[in-house]
Every structure is written in C-alpha cells, then in structure tokens.
Image (tube, grey):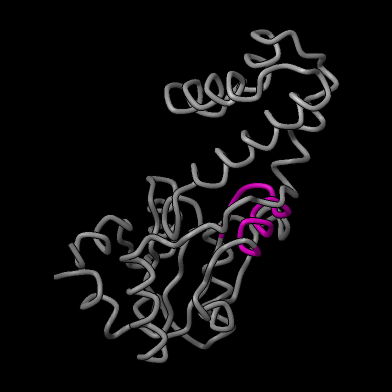
C-alpha cells in the first residue's frame, strides 16, 4: 500500500520538518555560507575556502564540533562561536527553502481531501521557526499547525497524544511521517501508524 492510500482514511497527518518536508542541509549550508562571508568581512580570510571546508566536514562527519574544527583550521577566536550559533537561529537566507517536490504534491493532496496537517519538530525552537518562515510553502502555510517540542518541554509522544485528545481522535485516525528511528519510536509509544518519508517520495517517482 502506498503512502497516500495509507493516509486516505486518516483525519490528521503529523510531520517532522528536517529531512521530511525539506533537506536539513539546504538550511545548514546557507548558514555556513553566511558565516564564511561574515568571517571574510571581519578577518579578511577567504570565504570560499572556509565554506568548502565546512561543507566537506558536514557532509563527511555531520554537525558535531564543526565550529571548533573550522576555528582551528582557520585560526578563529572562540568568540565567533556566538556568531555561528546566532546565525543558526536567525539567519536571513539568500534562498528560500524548497519542499521536496513529492512532499509538496502529497501535502497538496491532503489539503484537497481536508486532512488536518500538523508539524511536530525537535531542535531549537527559534531555529525551527526560522526555517518555517523561510520555506516556500506554495500557499500551504495556512493549513499548518506547528508544535515545537523544546518550547513545550514535552516529548513527541506526549504532543502526539495531546493532538489526538484535543481533536477527540484515536490513534487509528492519525498518521505520522518521519525520517528516523526516533520518530518511529515516539509514534509506537502511543500506537500511532508511522511511515518514513521515503515512502512518499517513492509514490511520485
């Protein structure tokens, strides 16, 4: 059964943000670009070299310790960590974030079928909100209800259950779309049906 058929009898669909609705790297690489430009302006160090280094480190080893590695490589003061962190929260991106094409089509079908759409996202709430504000939603934004786990200080499972309770629904009325084992585990805690976003991408290939 494909993802949309699975959603047909559901009343609400719950999504994560990063690597579900759009690639997380599309935000992070633009943050790194802006940071590299800032360092070039303040320290007269080559922005392209910094960006190339950060991209390779991120793609090879992820985000852990990325600032420290970059600072060590290019002789940057520890005080620039503040600027690096702040950009993650409030960067004004050169380019809008674009939804995965197949996910956009899926969301549009959900709206046509009058499904309720929720986003429950982890991570720094200010950063996640910044991503949402700079995403090209193609008019879908008015159909979204968003919850930030860090802001509410609740687990995803708790928020899922509150969504069900507030809408007088049971687990069989909902579907969670995620991209990792954590999302799957949180869904299973309250017996919510779960699919990985890849199943939706495959529907439209």
Count how many numbered circles sit on residues in the image: 0
Q: Is residue 9 magenta?
A: no
Magenta region? 121-133
Q: Is residue 179 left or right of residue 119?
A: left
Q: Position of residue 92 (x, y in %)?
A: 71, 52
Q: Which quadrant of the structure image shows residue 135? A: bottom right
Q: Is residue 28 left or right of residue 125?
A: left
Residue visible at 58% across and 73% down in the picture: 162
Q: Which quadrant of the structure image shows residue 13? A: bottom left
Magenta span: predominant SS is: helix
Q: Is residue 75 left or right of residue 164?
A: right
Q: Is residue 165 left or right of residue 110?
A: right
Residue visible at 42% across and 22% down in the picture: 60
In this view, the residue in front, 157 or 123, is: 123
Q: Which quadrant of the structure image shows residue 201? A: bottom left
Residue visible at 62% across and 47% down in the picture: 123
In this view, the residue in front, 72 or 74, is: 74
Q: Position of residue 157 (x, y in %)?
A: 52, 60
**Is 200 rendered above or below residue 78?**
below
**Is 65 rendered above or below residue 179?**
above
**Is 98 rendered above or below residue 124?**
below
Q: Position of residue 187 (x, y in %)?
A: 42, 60
Q: Position of residue 202 (x, y in %)?
A: 20, 60
């Amino acid at each position: 059964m494909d993802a949309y058929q699975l959603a047909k009898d559901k009343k609400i669909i719950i999504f994560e943000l990063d690597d579900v609705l759009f690639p997380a790297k599309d935000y992070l690489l633009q943050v790194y670009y802006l940071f590299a430009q800032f360092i070039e302006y303040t320290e007269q160090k080559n922005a392209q070299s910094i960006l190339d280094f950060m991209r390779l480190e991120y793609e090879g080893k992820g985000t852990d310790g990325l600032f420290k590695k970059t600072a060590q490589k290019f002789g940057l003061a520890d005080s620039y960590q503040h600027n690096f962190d702040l950009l993650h929260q409030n960067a004004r991106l050169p380019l809008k974030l674009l939804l995965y094409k197949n996910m956009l089509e899926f969301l549009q079908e959900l709206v046509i079928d009058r499904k309720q759409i929720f986003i429950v996202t982890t991570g720094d709430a200010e950063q996640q909100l910044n991503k949402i504000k700079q995403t090209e939603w193609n008019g879908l934004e008015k159909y979204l209800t968003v919850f930030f786990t860090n802001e509410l200080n609740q687990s995803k499972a708790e928020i899922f259950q509150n969504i069900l309770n507030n809408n007088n629904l049971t687990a069989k009325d909902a579907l969670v779309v995620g991209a990792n084992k954590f999302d799957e585990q949180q869904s299973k805690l309250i017996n919510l049906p779960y699919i990985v976003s890849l199943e939706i991408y495959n529907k439209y290939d």
